[in-house]
Amino acid sequence: MARFRKDPDPRFWQLNRSIDFDWRLAPYDIDQSQAHARGLMEIGVLSEEELGQIDAGLERVRDRIAAHGFEFDGADEDIHMAVERLLGEEIGPLAGKLHTGRSRNDQVATDVAMVVQAHSLRAIELCGAAMEQLLTLAEAHRDWPMPGYTHLQRAQPVYLGHHLLAYFWMLARDVLRFQFALDSASVMPLGSGALAGVNWEIDRDSVAADLGFEHVTHNSIDGASNRDFVLDYLAAASTCSMHLSRFGSEIVIWSSTEFGFCQLDESFSSGSSIMPQKLNPDSAELLRAKSPRVAANYSTLIGVMHALPLTYGKDMQEDKEPLFDAIDTIELCLDVTEGMLAGIEFDRERMEAASGDEMLAATEVADLLVRGGVPFREAHGIVGDLVRDAVEQGKPLSELTPDDLRRRSEHLDSTYYEVLQRSSWLESKRIAGGTGSVPLAAQLDSARETLAAVKARVVEERS
Ligand code: ARG
């Protein structure tokens, strides 16, 4: 840099350079430069011939990077300087005209917004693929009873299909969050310059359309200093990975010998180096354990942006590593989830046996009393007494005698024994959103519609 008489101290240089991680911006930076050059040509800053040379030169830089990996040298501070240097090697001093009407501040914000758009869409696609597996499994297991849990204690029976669809709806909300991130990254900062705008009346709308942005920023100060779209992506990814961690955790529990509810395919399990019998659910454990690092990436960037005066500060260079790490982690985890689901096997008998525990019908008996006019709180107390009687006598609820029942309430007659028939506990949940097979069929219909809309969205965005 002409102003400087001294070279940077190597320690400062090491701290300041971002090329070691921002090389991943290369294809976006090149696309952006090609669109910017067209914008410069339209206002007469570049001739048509110069545009042709710059465009072709950038294509050669793209090919060089694709073929040999990044050939950056020790003097490259960041990807933007490196692409410009490589372009200079290709086309000579003309490369220097490309930076007219652009600052690295609006340039980097634009590259990063392009990354967020591309990977929000990819996350939506991957959520859709996992949702499809969940829906297929839910349809196949729509009438398999299992215990539902609260506090990891058996609570009330549900159908396995209903339980699996709970994850479907979590991912459906993740899709909405990634869509929000995509929309928030679809406003182009380019043209904001360093912070005040630029002296060249480039047609920003046409550059934006060229690059696939929906809008351009209204305010150059905001344009140069905004990283909300990265935070929006990181927030979406944090919530999504939290969902996957809960799924992973249930699979770890369910696949244990103690539960025996399911088994993962061998291709998603590992063995033990010492215990030959082991089939460990490492994939599910890692879904669980990857989640906090994604949330930490959000926390890193909100910390960087916190209290940062407008507009650009070098602090903002620290947006990239958390973003790239979150992208790599969530995309891998979603893909693994899809693969795990495709090969999982459930054990109908084990689940059904566990759901046959009569204690799970306690709420049903309370509701029977309510139908006879007993206030629910009182009914809850009566059934609590019956449960204690049964536990003390070492019998299931259905083996209490009519005398035992009468001692506790005059409202208990033979319907008590009917209510303890297992299928009635599930089928009595006829309310919309409940586990009964009637609302479950409606839920499956809604899930099919939701999945079709997610897939259509991806196709539309890609076209
Ligand atoms: N490598 C920088 C970043 O990632 C590019 C922008 C540099 N701008 C500046 N004014 N030094 O943020």
Image (cartoon, rainbow, N blue to C red):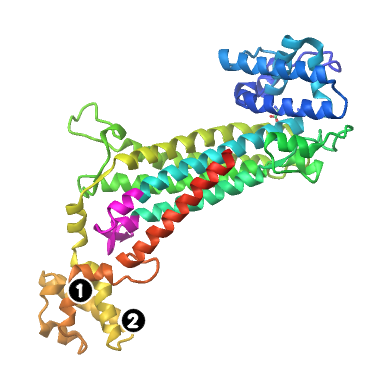
Residue bearing the label numbered 2: 377
Residue 18: give x, y in percent of width and height: 65, 24
Quick check: is 8 in the magenta stretch?
no
Q: Quadrant of the C terminus?
A: top right
Quadrant holding the N terminus? top right
Question: Which residue is painted at 66% across and 42% down in the image?
Answer: 185
First to last magenta residue range: 136-163
Which numbered dot is residue 152?
A: none
What residue type is disc 1 on?
Answer: Val
- Looking at the image, residue 294 sits to the left or right of residue 386; the answer is right
Q: Nearer the viewer, residue 443 or 334?
A: 443
Mark 2: give few (<14), some (14-19) or many (20+) Cα within 10 Å.
few
Q: Quadrant of residue 285?
A: top left
Label 2 near ligand 1 (CB < 8 Å): no
| Percent of width and height locating residue 283 | 35, 36
In the displayed structure, does residue 298 sit left or right of residue 76?
Answer: left
Gap between marks 2 and 1 measured at Cα: 15 Å
Q: Which residue is mark 1?
A: 387
Ligand 1 resides in the quarter of the picture at top right
In terms of depth relative to the viewer, which is nearer, 436 or 406? 436
Magenta segment: does it hold 158? yes
Label 1 crowd bin: few (<14), some (14–19), many (20+), radius 10 Å: some
> Which one is nearer the viewer's eye here, 449 or 309?
449
Please determine whether, in this image, residue 449 is positioned above or below residue 405.
Answer: above
Residue 41: percent from the left, percent from the top? Answer: 83, 26
